[in-house]
């Protein structure tokens, strides 16, 4: 069936929203994992029925969940109902929620500390998985961006995870510092054309690129300017909120930084500001139209002290020129008394003929625009605060 | 002062799980575990994780094996959370007369 399946992570569980290609009527299922924080869910591009979810709790730590039937049923990898949970030797078949930082000499100098809020060094401590990025080529391979910032990888469908140590091992790790929301690796972008290339973004460190499948990394924050850090032009320390890329143009990146909307045309080698006529260039989300690589979306937020839309008006801004010239999109969105936030992983686009744009708010609304942003409708009004939104398209 | 006993053989221990760990393990609110040797928090949790391996890492840290900060252990009306995990549990726990309670702290607002 043609249509869209929207995967929503919230403060109190996961929800799955489904519709046909008109995207006018929606079925809502959930909550899954009720009461738990679901930072992110995402489906495999190889097998859309293979879903992964990051389930977390301040009480019970990290859990990874997987579905092999499009979200109807879920299990912790290695604990599928009816399958043995122990090896013949009596050992657990899985440690799917075990994320341990690599300290082996074989992968370079073990990193043990990063910069703390007061400038002192602080031990690296695993807290949760912020983002899951399934491989473009293998349904059992998934990258996980975690807090404290690091990149982990599973190649067995989530049963076990190990750190891709080249990111933290490249030298600047001791200078990374947490932002107000923690020190999380929140964005992972895989390049379909150049399979060994990957971008990751960390708050508050910046953007990093690998061209050798993660063995080595380098920061690509040249020309970023952040007035709120001691050296505004430092190699690392920038609070990058989100980056986005169109798969057909992998050298062009768009960034929503803490302040500033930025663009790079050389795979992060250089950046230039494209905030243009935005009412404020603070925000969290940024995304690119599925069929128009130069059409970009942001949701301006008033400031880093006031996390809500300017003037109480919820407006998505669209640029059809790759930045600088922005148009407010308001039809169907509340234009008075609206004081929600839109968090960094809470915008997505589908790939249907008429590109659909989706975003979720901390007020529990998930909005859809089935016409590229021209008009908006709430799919749901009253979910828990939305942490993440992903969409799967069925053409 | 709590009285304790040493179990010379395997003993059936009762453990009450918090709501979210029941759903995660598909277990009943109270589970019964066979524990070999001295009955301690560590030996009980070892038995619990052996029976329900999906709970590994949810009560104590995978690496340090330390209790997660927002969880507490109660037995016979006393908070044993700050006791050594190798301290012997009270006789009524070791005999199965009373359950060991794993409690999620009330936090937030």
Image (tube, helix red, strand yellow):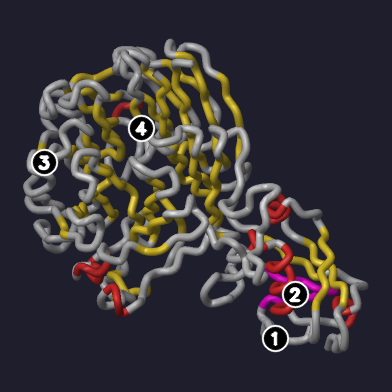
At a point 33% along the width and 76% down the height, the residue shown is A112
Position of the C terminus of chain A, as image quadrant, is top left
Chain ID, mark 3:
A
Q: Measuring from the top left, give residue B63's x and y in whole percent.
A: 52, 74
Task: Please tell me whether mark 1 or mark 2 is closer to you in this view.
Answer: 2
Q: Residue furthest front?
A: A88
Chain ID, mark 4:
A
Left or right? Give the position of B61 relative to B9: left
Taken as a whole, is the magenta stretch helix, strand or loop? Answer: strand
Report the Cα–Cα distance between label 1 and label 2. Answer: 10 Å
Front one among A2 and A137: A137
Residue of label 3 = A264
Q: Measuring from the top left, give residue A302's x and y in whole percent.
A: 28, 36
| Numbered badge on residue A347 | 4
* Residue numbers of the magenta segment: B72-81
Is residue A141 visible in this depiction of the protein? yes
């Amino acid at each position: 069936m043609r249509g869209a399946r929207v995967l929503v992570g919230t403060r109190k569980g996961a929800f799955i929203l489904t519709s046909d290609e008109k995207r006018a009527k929606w079925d809502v299922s959930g909550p899954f994992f009720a009461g738990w924080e679901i930072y992110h869910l995402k489906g495999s591009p190889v097998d859309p029925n293979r879903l992964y979810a990051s389930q977390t709790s301040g009480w019970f730590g990290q859990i990874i969940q997987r579905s092999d039937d499009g979200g109807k049923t879920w299990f912790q990898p290695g604990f599928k109902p009816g399958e043995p949970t122990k090896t013949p030797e009596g050992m657990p078949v899985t440690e799917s929620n075990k994320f341990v930082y690599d300290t082996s000499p074989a992968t370079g100098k073990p990193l043990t500390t990063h910069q703390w809020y007061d400038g002192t060094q602080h031990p690296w401590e695993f807290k949760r998985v912020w983002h899951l990025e399934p491989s473009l080529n293998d349904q059992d391979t998934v990258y996980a961006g975690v807090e404290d910032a690091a990149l982990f990888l599973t190649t067995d469908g989530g049963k076990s995870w190990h750190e891709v140590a080249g990111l933290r091992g490249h030298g600047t790790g001791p200078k990374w510092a947490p932002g107000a929301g923690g020190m999380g690796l929140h964005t992972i972008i895989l390049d379909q054309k150049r399979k060994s290339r990957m971008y990751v973004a960390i708050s508050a460190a910046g953007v990093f690129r690998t061209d050798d499948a993660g063995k080595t990394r380098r920061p690509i924050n040249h020309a970023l300017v952040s007035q709120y850090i001691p050296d505004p032009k430092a190699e690392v320390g920038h609070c990058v909120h989100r980056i986005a890329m169109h798969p057909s143009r992998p050298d062009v990146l768009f960034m929503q930084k803490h302040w500033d909307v930025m663009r790079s045309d050389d795979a992060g080698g250089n950046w230039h500001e494209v905030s243009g006529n935005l009412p404020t260039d603070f925000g969290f989300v940024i995304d690119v139209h599925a069929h128009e690589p130069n059409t970009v979306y942001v949701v301006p937020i008033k400031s880093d002290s006031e996390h809500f839309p300017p003037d109480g008006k919820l407006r998505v801004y669209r640029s059809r020129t790759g930045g600088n010239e922005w148009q407010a999109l308001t039809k169907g969105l509340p234009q008075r008394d609206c004081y929600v936030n839109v968090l960094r992983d809470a915008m997505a686009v589908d790939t249907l003929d008429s590109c659909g744009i989706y975003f979720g708010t901390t007020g529990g609304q998930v909005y859809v625009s089935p016409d590229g942003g021209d008009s908006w409708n709430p799919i749901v009004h009253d979910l828990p605060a939305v942490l993440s939104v992903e969409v799967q398209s069925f053409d | 002062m709590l009285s304790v006993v040493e179990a010379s053989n395997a003993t059936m221990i009762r453990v009450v799980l918090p709501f979210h760990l029941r759903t995660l393990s598909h277990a009943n609110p109270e589970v019964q575990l066979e524990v070999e040797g001295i009955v301690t928090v560590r030996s009980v949790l070892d038995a619990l994780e052996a029976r329900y391996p999906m709970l590994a890492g949810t009560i104590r840290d995978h690496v340090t094996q330390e209790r997660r900060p927002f969880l507490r252990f109660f037995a016979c009306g006393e908070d044993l959370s700050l006791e050594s995990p190798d301290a012997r549990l009270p006789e009524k726990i070791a005999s199965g007369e009373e359950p060991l309670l794993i409690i999620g702290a009330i936090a937030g607002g």
